[in-house]
Amino acid sequence: PMRPPKDPGYQTDEVKRRIAFRKNADWDAMQEMLENAGIVKKIAVASESQHESERTLAILALTAIHDIMKVQALLPTVQPEHEAFCGFQPGEVIDDHDVALGYVLKFYPGLLPSFAGLPKSAQRSVRFTQCKMEYNMGWLVQA
């Protein structure tokens, strides 16, 4: 945490923003979001919740790895034994960072220990975040 300067009358813009956020944030909505995401769940006592460690670990692992394929040197090439992958052909470098991560998570999960160490159900959740759902809002509107 950022410590305020020694002069109690002085506050940096950063400290002011943090104080304003803490004061004005909709904490009930944030609690609801965490519950909906399965990170915490309500327990018998209405004002308390229980931490879901497996889901939280999955979120932390995803946070650690989610943008690593933005480093071009890490982009994988589709291997011949995998045939096509999300529109990328064997021998082609996967230059979409989300698809590239999805490829590594599917075929080479051991390369990412923070992912490989997750329980299988958590791995499925993380892998799901990297899929291309091919959702098009225009199609919904037209339907």
Image (cartoon, rainbow, N blue to C red):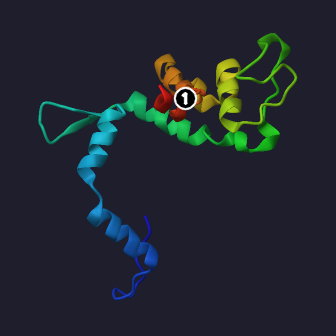
**Above or below: residue 103 compared with residue 1:** above
**Residue 10, horizontal then vertical, whole percent:** 39, 87
Looking at the rendering, which quadrant does residue 25 occupy?
Answer: bottom left
**Residue 132, horizontal then vertical, whole percent:** 60, 28
Q: Is residue 43 left or right of residue 57?
A: left
Residue in the foreground of this view, choosing between 39 and 114: 39
**Above or below: residue 22 compared with residue 31:** below
**Residue 94, horizontal then vertical, whole percent:** 77, 31
Label 1 Cα neighbours within 10 Å, binned few <14 / some 14-19 / many ≥20: few
Residue in the foreground of this view, choosing between 10 and 88: 88
Q: Is residue 106 left or right of residue 127?
A: right
Secondary structure at badge 1 equals: loop
Q: Residue, x 77% and y 13% (percent of image)?
A: 82
**Residue 74, horizontal then vertical, whole percent:** 78, 37
Residue that numbered label 1 is attached to: 135
Q: Residue furthest left?
A: 45
Q: Amino acid at mark 1?
A: Tyr
- Assign the N terminus to one quadrant of the image: bottom left
Q: Residue furthest top?
A: 81
Q: Residue furthest right?
A: 91
Looking at the rendering, which quadrant does residue 133 occupy?
Answer: top right
Q: Residue, x 55% and y 31% (percent of image)?
A: 136
Q: Is residue 119 left or right of residue 110?
A: left
**Tally of numbered tags:** 1
